Amino acid sequence: ACFDFEGTGPQILGNLNAPPAVTYSAVIYSLRSLVGQDIPLNQGCLAPIEFKIPSYSLLNPSDDVGVVGGNVLTSQRVVDVVLKAFKACAASQGCMNNLTFGDDRFGYYETIAGGAGAGPTWEGRSGVHTHCTNTRITDPEILERRYPVLL
């Protein structure tokens, strides 16, 4: 199989660029979600796959541009594109919606749910974690016990 990302836009000055490893992860996630059986999550799964990702693009930037947002935003869009190519489902909300706060003594990071696209046999959903952000939010009682916050 060949995943051809030729035509991807150029790298940008902001931080939404994603190194190739993010694209590889998004593709393997997508493929694992499409098959009807468990397959191992390792580099061997990518061995039969060819990737075409142009240099200095949003998905293969140079070493001197920001990439932090590529993991939380661009990765979700790569998943959406792959799933759409297979006609598996409509796009998700396309972002991991991060909430962070803290100071010099602590830091807190949480992903917040968005929405999932409809598929051939199911309706879309709102207020759910999707794809790469499929995590469970911290229970309010735990958050209030561990951090100096009240919800």
Image (tube, rainbow, N blue to C red):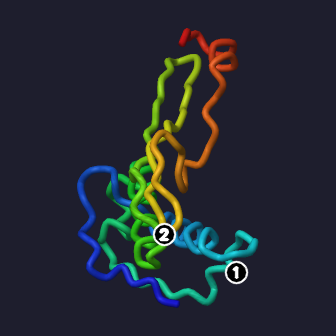
Residue 105, image x, y percentages: 58, 17
Residues at marks 2 and 1, CA–CA distance in whole angstroms: 30 Å
Residue 93, image x, y percentages: 39, 50
Q: Nearer the viewer, mark 2 or mark 1?
A: 2
In the picture shown, does residue 129 fall above or below 144? below
**Depth check: 27 or 12 in front?**
27
Residue in view at x 46 percent, y 53 percent: 124
Residue 83, image x, y percentages: 47, 71
Three-letter code for the amino acid on which mark 2 is drawn: Pro
| Residue under pointer 2 | 120
Residue in view at x 39 percent, y 70 percent: 81
Three-letter code for the amino acid on which mark 1 is drawn: Gly
Q: Tell me how many marks there are.
A: 2
| Residue under pointer 1 | 44
- Describe the element under mark 2 as helix, strand or loop: loop
In the picture shown, does residue 134 fall above or below 81? above
In the picture shown, does residue 67 fall above or below 129? below
Image quadrant in which you'd find residue 106: top right
Image quarter (top left, top right, bottom left or bottom right) of the C terminus? top right
